[in-house]
Image: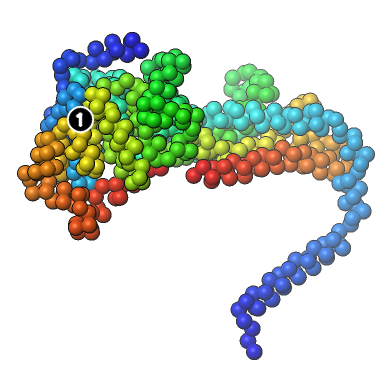
Amino acid sequence: MSDVTTDRGAGGAEDAPAIDVRGLRKAFGELEVLRGIDFSVGRGEVVCVIGPSGSGKSTLLRCVNLLEEPSAGRVTVAGTEVTDPDVDIDRVRRRIGMVFQSFNLFPHLTALENLTIAQRRVLRRGRPEAERIGRANLERVGLGDKATAYPAQLSGGQQQRVAIARALSMDPELMLFDEPTSALDPELVGDVLAVMRGLARDGMTMLVVTHEMSFAREVADRVVFMDGGVIVEQGTPEQVVGAPSHERTRTFLARVLDPAAAEVGEVADDGAAGRRVDR
Amino acid sequence: MPLSRRRRARIIRGVQYGVLVVAVVVLALVADWHQLRTAFFDVEVAKALFPDIITTALLNTILYTLLGFGFGLALGLVLALMRLSSVPPYRWIAITYIEFFRGIPALLVFIALGFGVPLAFEVALDMNVTVMLSLGLVGAAYMAETIRAGIQAVPKGQTEAARSLGMSQGRAMVSIIIPQAFRIVLPPLTNELILLTKDSSLVYLLGLALNQFELANFGRDALNEHKSLTPILIAGLLYLVITLPLGQLVRRLEARTAKAR
């Protein structure tokens, strides 16, 4: 565990922001999904990104750990520029936890093995240490009794909590959440959000793409509203969700907060319903 | 009164059964049962086959099959990874190999290897090695395509999750993707094993010594010796002893996969 800590120190200056994004652009062929994004996340800050589907918020998140290769611009994570062609991206990714909409647990491994495999193969921790850390993190997400369960034996909410525990087991400096509750049945959302709330309380740096407005309002230090590949506005939850200054933000919030009042076609187009879960 | 649709269907089916029964009865009456019995069910000849047909022939069939399967599986995995590689020459090599060995009869490969390799390299390969190479080279082409399909059937999110935990591309492949891919392709791979069991009969082309005979060749040899077809029947039954449990295994695996989905 000690060598991991020194790894981090090598990453960059302690006072550098957790995430710094400058002039980020991303195009898939002709389609420009991100059209010049500038923003940063401070250490210990919880930032929620909201916006309609297709606004580029998931792509932004995936550019932070280079699951998507930016077309232009610079992304720096804790002082390490990940867009530098010479960077060892695998080393940077160890420090960035990521939670997916579709959980992406490894179905051939038990919950505990899901938590230990990267610790052992990537961080080179011994089995006893990896299992100790894994069990502690399962405990932390309230699933201490599910160590030997396979993902298929768990509910969606439990799977997502195991996925969070898996990311935490790598002792990440920051966590990325890509619509973590969008694939869940409504009654299972609460447990996952509770775990995320706990993380935020413990001071974890978090960048969260979400449709959970109440979560954003309650937990986020800052809310970023994206539309059409640009950041339309950002600020405290009170400002952005409570008193948005842009018309586009107001329209979006009206639809999300009161779906019944929205035009049917627009809502169906938005968020989790429209996105296929790949499992 | 015109017949109802259902009634007409029933009559047509009845006629079909009738034709089938008549054909079987006619064949049974025409066949010379005495001849058949003496040719295929000669108890004395059958007794003479044992125990060699088990201790030599059956064991050799299993040995050759496993040698070919093991080598073919390893080479098939390498070819599948090359086929999926982002490096174009690897892909071309894999595609060329697969298309070539899928396209030519295994029989020709056996002859080419059995006689070509000693000529080209002036070495006499061990028979087991030659068998392993011949069966494996052909089997690998089929298994490569099966394994490739399995790897591609693993959802993309699995790779993303592995990579986001800091695993390299290779580590993600070994620890996360390939174990899942093999679960997916276990039924078709078992089918491949059944096909290889039967293809192992082609090793006679390599020129076998007596103690290297496998089932088919052993049966053919005994046929000449005893002037009886009984060895063919016994050899055939022994193939089924190997392949039927494997077929059963495939069905069980498929049922398990279906349940897991």
B33 sits left or right of A135 in the view: right
What amino acid type is highlighted by mark number 1?
Val
Residue farthest to the bottom?
A: B1
Q: Is residue B259 above or below residue A206?
A: below
Name the residue: 55% across, 33% down.
B140
Please name the residue that numbered disc 1 is placed on: A46
Image quadrant where one finds the N terminus of chain B: bottom right
Structural crowding at the residue carrying mark 1, measured as other residues with C-alpha within 10 Å and reported as few (<14), some (14–19) or many (≥20): many
Residues B226 and A147: in front is A147
Counting from the top left corner in percent of width and height, residue A42 is at 16, 24
Residue A219: quarter of image: top left
Counting from the top left corner in percent of width and height, residue B122 is at 62, 18
Name the residue: 82% across, 35% down.
B221
The chain under label 1 reads A
Residue A263: quarter of image: bottom left
Counting from the top left corner in percent of width and height, residue A119 is at 39, 20
Q: Secondary structure at mark 1?
A: strand
Name the residue: 48% across, 38% down.
A153
Q: Is residue B16 visible?
A: yes
Residue A129: quarter of image: top left
Residues B222 and A211: in front is A211
Q: Is residue B172 visible?
A: no
Residues A140 and B13: in front is A140
Counting from the top left corner in percent of width and height, residue B230 is at 85, 43
